[in-house]
Image: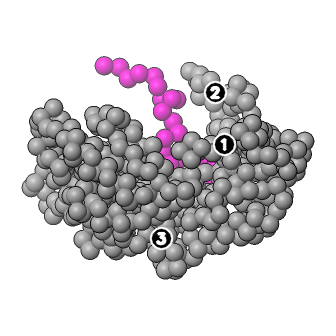
Amino acid sequence: MAESDNSNCLKGYSYAEPEIQQFVKDFSKLILEDALIPQTDPNTRVLNFKQPLDLQKFLDLEIYEEPIPREKLLELGKKVIGGSIVPGHPHFFNTMYSAIDPYSLFGAWLTEALNCNVHTYEVAPVMVTLENYIFKKISSVIGYPDGEGIFCPGSSFSNLTAIHLARFRYNSTLREKGMFTCEPMTILKSEDAHYSIEKGASFLGFGTDNVVTIKTDDRGRIIPKDLEHKIRQCKQNKCAPIMFMATCGTTVLGSYDDLEAVADICQRHNVWMHADGAWGGGVMLSDKLKHLTKGIERSDSVAWNIHKMGGAGIQCSVFVVKEKGFLERCNAYRAEYLFQPDKIYDTSYDIGDRTIQCGRKNDVLKLWLMWKGRGDKAMGARIEKAFENAAYLTEKLKLTEGFRLVLPEFQCTNISFWYIPPRLRGQNETAEWWKEVGKVAPAIKGRMMLKGSLMISYQPLSTKGLVNFFKVIVGNPVCERSDMDFIVDEIIRLAEDV
């Protein structure tokens, strides 16, 4: 059979080729000089906003039969940087992540260069060894004497996994028999908890009608009496309450549930207690702040996104279980093409059956290298600085005319507030007045994006009957008090004539 004439198409794959080595050097330089260094300068823009159709033209999306030169690829890299938001910018407060830690970036680049899967020791000996270690470390931080865990593609997946495990503990025969063979089951969460529980209930076959919502107080924290009442109600209605998800730092108000009270109730009723610390779990690294998660060691599982307040590269989502071996008991199917029992090493190091995934991204290296490079003390100091900046901003808002806090104080670094423009001050606060206030944040946010000077989010909170307000997320360790001042001053500038 004659060889196809594809020789020209198959050039440029080997890193031994001088041209490819130069390309790697060139794009590394581009990333450093165009993406990483400028993001620390507060005088640069946070974004260069383009409408979707304009952005499509700017990026030159079309792929052709023939390749483009490597120089053009570098130009496209510049365009990608130019059209992207800059989360590491000191004036980016929009969502729950910021700059990637330089040591974590080293781990992320090394991960991509090695390009290995993480399911058996055979194909990923270093990564498996690191995962086993890092989950011992994280378990000790949580307070689990013998915990284990997995990396998940986001905390929504972690919370879904918690439901999956809770169902297995309630009735392990469901793996084979399915959900048609037992009484209905319910999942409980607070009204301010993450919406991934509804998604998980739908995905796993419970149905969203079987998600029971627990009331929260005016600060967004669960009301334990209502949890007790709803669990008893479920049992009376012949619906088995299998899991409650407590929250350590809610998405909007940053509230921490009373984990001790939750644990008492869950243990009394044999309900799986899952702690969603995706956002606020980072306080466990700080001796000053870990009281916020007091009682977390009594939970059955924990979700924690270390790419949020912790600074690891996205994504770095850990799911940790108190009982060692439980993940594998729930998930293992021992695929014979992967998990042969007669390998030359201890096959307990083949960790792939801890998760419902098969092939899995290696997320441990960027965490281990960052933690190793920073040490426990600096990891905690990063969290503490975010809380100090958030406290300063809270006081600044209290003292500045036109700003009104959604809560008197905040437990986490989510700082929520309204800006009342001059035209609305000193009026009766009727329903119509609040309707007008609700239009202010979207108007200012639009100006903010077009100017590119600042990024913070806004939203209503229907569970509390609140109209649109601003929500600042403080987490970037390069931010100083001057950046908190900038938020206030820039909103006032942007709000002229609103």
Badge 1: few (under 14), some or many (20 or more) residues near its Cα, within 10 Å? some
Q: Earlier in the sequence, mark 3 or mark 2?
A: 2
Question: Quarter-wise, where is residue 496 in the image?
Answer: top right
Q: Which residue is mark 2?
A: 61
C-alpha distance separating marks 1 and 3:
28 Å
Does the magenta segment cover residue 7? Answer: yes
- Find numbered disc 2 in the image and state the secondary structure of the residue it sits on: loop
| Residue found 51% across the figure and 75% down from its top | 289
Q: Position of residue 70 (x, y in %)?
A: 64, 38
Q: Position of residue 180 (x, y in %)?
A: 15, 32
Q: Which residue is mark 1?
A: 467
Q: Nearer the viewer, mark 1 or mark 3?
A: 1
The magenta region covers 1-28
- Closer to us: 73 or 441: 441
Q: Earlier in the sequence, mark 1 or mark 3?
A: 3
- Find numbered disc 3 in the image and state the secondary structure of the residue it sits on: helix
Quadrant where the image shows the N terminus: top left
- Relative height, residue 108 to residue 191 (above, below): below
Amino acid at circle 1? Val
Quadrant where the image shows the C terminus: top right
Question: Quarter-wise, where is residue 226 in the image?
Answer: bottom left
